[in-house]
Amino acid sequence: MSAFPDHDIDAEVLAGARAGDRAAHAALYETFGDPVYTLALRILRSPAAADEVLQDTFVEVIRSIASFDGRGPCGAWIRRIAVNKSLMQLRSPWRRQARQLGGRDSHPAVEPQHAGEDMPLRLDLDKALGELSERARAVLWLHDVEGYTHQEIGRLMGRSSSFSKSQLARAHARLKALLGEPEETRTCMHALTSC
């Protein structure tokens, strides 16, 4: 499950951020920085690209916070910005060129940051996620972890909901082949979201 709903921002901090208060901007970053970075890292598998998405996301958040209407949770708004920035990275011609030079996934496996009894599951899933295509991994993460619908994912990726469904089915089949039963995969996905 997405880490964004676990975080909430005080109305006073939000008002301060809208007014341009730097301490309020810092509070937004402290609250949502880790979930933004985790989302970008899991989709892009590159710490450098995730750092760039983190920076770009908060530049846009600070620029646009005054126009945030408050109809939904602030975290959902920030998550949407982070998802768009991550998908823009996937479509980047620089990223395509790096992939061509370095093979299928030119970035090393993501190292989970927290140890625990589920560490072997995290490492197995992380390795398996690296075996997926970028699109399949993005669809899987957005659907299974962030809770986006197929229609929303299709719209975000400039495709149809059928595209999202087929990518997710392929990703699940590949993960099942690599990891075993679906229940174990769900346990692993849950473990990765806590990083």
Image (cartoon, rainbow, N blue to C red):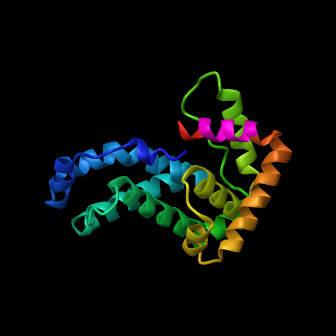
| 109 is higher (above) or lower (below) than 17 | above
- Is 139 inside the magenta-drawn segment? no
Q: Position of residue 184 (x, y in %)?
A: 74, 36
In the visual, does 61 lie left or right of 84?
A: left
**Image-quadrant location for residue 56:** bottom left
Number of marks in picture: 0
| 69 is higher (above) or lower (below) than 23 | below
Q: Is residue 111 visible?
A: no
Q: Position of residue 169 (x, y in %)?
A: 77, 60
Q: Position of residue 187 (x, y in %)?
A: 67, 36
In the visual, does 65 lie left or right of 45?
A: left
Name the one closer to the observer, 135 or 1. 1
Identify the residue at image location x=58%, y=25%: 115
Identify the residue at image location x=33%, y=65%: 60
**Placement of the N terminus among the 4 image quadrants:** top right
Identify the residue at image location x=61%, y=66%: 95
Q: Is residue 106 visible?
A: yes
Identify the residue at image location x=46%, y=52%: 51
Q: Position of residue 166 (x, y in %)?
A: 75, 67
Find the residue positioned furthest to the right. Answer: 177
**Image-quadrant location for residue 183:** top right
- Is 188 inside the magenta-drawn segment? yes
| 1 is higher (above) or lower (below) than 141 | above
Which region shows up in magenta? 183-191
Main SS, magenta residues: helix
Name the one closer to the observer, 20 or 155. 155
Find the residue positioned furthest to the top. Answer: 117
